[in-house]
Image (cartoon, rainbow, N blue to C red):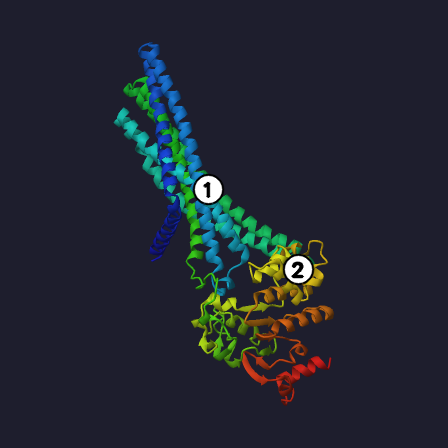
Amino acid sequence: MKILSKQTRSATSTKQAMQLFKYLKPHWAAFSAGMLFLLLSSLAGLAFPKLLGELIDVSKKNHHDSAINMIGLSLISMLMAQSVFSFFRTILFVNVSEKTLATLRQTIYNHLIQLPMNFFLTRRVGELSSRISSDITLLQETFTNTLPEFVRQLIIISGGLTLLMMTSISLTGFMLAILPVMVIIAVVFGRFIRHLSKDIQNQVASSNTVVEETLQGIFSVKAFASEFFEMKRYTGRTNEAARIGIKGGKFKAALSSFIIMGIFGALVAVIWRGAVIGLDTGKLFSFVLYSVFIGSSIGGLAEIYTSLQKSIGATENLFQILDETKEPLSDIVKIDPEHQLQGNISFRNISFHYPSREDSPVLKGVSFNVSANQKVALVGPSGAGKSTIVSLLLRLYDPSNGHIFFDKKENHHFPLSALRSQMSVVPQDVFLFGGTIGENIAYGKQDATEEELIAAAKKANAWEFIQRFPLGLQTIVGERGIQLSGGQRQRIAIARAVLKAPRILILDEATSALDAESERLVQDALNKLMEGRTSIVIAHRLATIRQADKIIVLDKGAIVEEGTHKELVNVHEGLYKNLSEMQFTQ
């Protein structure tokens, strides 16, 4: 059963590797031309031993300068032709590989970014970025050098064997006696090296994850004085990759040593045997050269086979990503009238658990209604399920049970991209891209004019600090907006939401981490933003949601209270009343 499993995996890996050739289709003409030049350069190389042997025989049998000169000129012509063929072959293969792998990179990235949130729950950013960088770089070497070299070696071996048999069949058979043994050993060693190569790629991806996480969280690393801990973590990952690499090197060294011993042992035996049977000097010289060509090609095949096994390992990792089912997204240019939201929301008996934690329900039978343009607040202790409701609204996940309706139509009736494009989220921990302030605001509307950006910034109370920067909207915010304060980042996020003009606005603890002055400015901007649209507000600071049209109180995944502030503070021993008293009496 175990053997069958290995065979199945091997067949799957080979099938995945063959899928790479579909990316060559648009460049098939250039690839075929490259193969033609490869064939011609290989055949030109095969002519050398024969011509050299003839040159030796002619010089020994007669001294006609014309015959010698003719063969000499043929050798020079063949050398020039081989150089030209090799030049064009290299140019063509480089062009094809660069274009093919650019397409593959785009395909992997485009697929990756469309995968559902479930996928990213179990993957780390560093590992995924390593797949797109180091794994595809490995394939680049395969397309540019390894694959053409593999074909060239096969041509040399098959062509050389043909010419050897034309010279002496008995001597050829004698020389080939060792070949089957070498091939079997190359295959066996290749399997070991392939598994080790995949392990190395995994360790490299793991070490890249450490780098990615520590650089993204450099503030936390510094604040907790964890530099040496992270150095040890990275050292452990890279040392493990080195250990596996060294182990693979031992296998490759053993394989190469055996092949070299076999090749040169065969050459000695061939020359000895040729001398015994009295082969002409020129023919024996050609035979030996062809034997060297074939022997070195067979020896090179072991290294090429190893490289191809590495590529297959990298291909497995890449196609595992492509095998994941992506979300049904579409590029939204204009939303059809039937898919435009009015802002009515209805949760009906919603239950939910995360795919990785099926035994831990997050929501249990949650039902509530939100009317268009209402301001509804979600409150409750941490872990009550407030942020999960936001994720379900955005269809980052689908509920385990129950139904979600927008304007009395089930959420699946709306195209996913159309649904999300009419919502906007202002989170507690704002993520800003490392470009300019203008680019970050324009993320809400890619074709916005500068006037629109300034208008959005003014509504978000952000223009005041933006215009104080010498470069204004062109100011670089740094990695994750590190050069801006928390309040400034929040106001840029609000400006982004203003520009998007969503029908449904979601505020997830948008002011909880701000000082009093920043909170005042941000809250004022939020109040402007909430006018005329449905707003879902998650808040721990209850003072910010007193004016909400409805407050929904959650605890342990269920709704325990619902009403206005005035209604809920009068509920005897109610959760909302207790939370209010705790905050307002401090």
Task: Assign the C terminus to one quadrant of the image.
Answer: bottom right
| Horizontal side, residue 464 vs residue 47: left or right | right
Q: Residue furthest front?
A: 451
Q: Residue at x 59, y 65 (%)?
A: 499
Q: Position of residue 38 (x, y in %)?
A: 38, 34
| Horizontal side, residue 191 vs residue 544: left or right | left
Residue hosting label 2: 220
**Residue type marked 2:** Ser
**Residue type marked 1:** Glu
Q: Residue at x 48, y 62 (%)?
A: 333
Query: Is residue 251 at least partly visible in the picture?
Result: no
How far, Cα to Cα, is label 2 from label 1?
38 Å
| Horizontal side, residue 449 vs residue 297: left or right | right
Question: To which quarter of the image does residue 187 belong?
Answer: top left
Q: Position of residue 291 (x, y in %)?
A: 35, 28
Frontmost residue, 256 versus 83: 83
Q: Is residue 581 above or below residue 252?
A: below
Q: Is residue 7 above or below residue 515?
A: above
Residue 141 is tagged as 1
